[in-house]
Amino acid sequence: MKRAQLPPWVIVTGAVVMAFPFGWGVGLLAAYIIAGKEVGQLPAATVPLGLLGVLAFAVSPTAQPTTRFKILSAGAVLLVALAWLVA
């Protein structure tokens, strides 16, 4: 049985969408690691850096589109679960 193939641009679009919660979580995690629980205004600097880094990964040709989508999806789920456990 032949597997259905999605065009790569659809998968990359999904990776870009998943990059937003993952990048946001990376930025907040960086602020939390740097400053502890009293992060104050630090996420204003770390969240945009996290978003830029993850968005660059989402559109870069470093890995197959499906691999990038899987990494970003798993990372977003893990960071949301971590945030839920910490809160």
Image: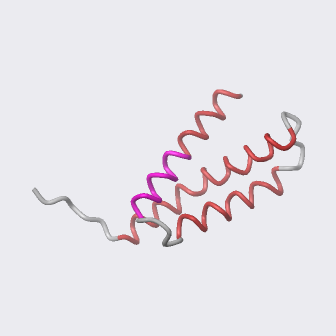
Q: Position of residue 24 (x, y in %)?
A: 67, 51
x, y percent for residue 73: 49, 49
| Residue at 67% over, 60% down | 51
Q: Is residue 44 left or right of residue 10?
A: right
Residue plotted at (47% across, 59% down): 68
Image location (x, y in percent) of residue 4: 21, 61
How far from the left and from the top, in percent, is residue 26? 68, 49
Q: Residue furthest left?
A: 1
Q: Residue at x 53, y 64 (%)?
A: 58
Q: Is residue 46 left or right of residue 56?
A: right
Total number of numbered discs in the rendering: 0
On-image quarter of the C terminus: top right
Determine whether, in the image, residue 76 is placed left or right of residue 63.
right
Q: Quarter of the image holding residue 9?
A: bottom left
Residue found at the far front of this picture: 62
Q: Quadrant of the N terminus?
A: bottom left
Q: Is residue 38 magenta?
A: no
The vertical placement of 67 against 38, above or below, is: below
Residues drawn in magenta: 65-75
Of the pair 31 and 24, the residue shown nearer to us? 31
Please identify the dominant SS of the magenta region.
Answer: helix
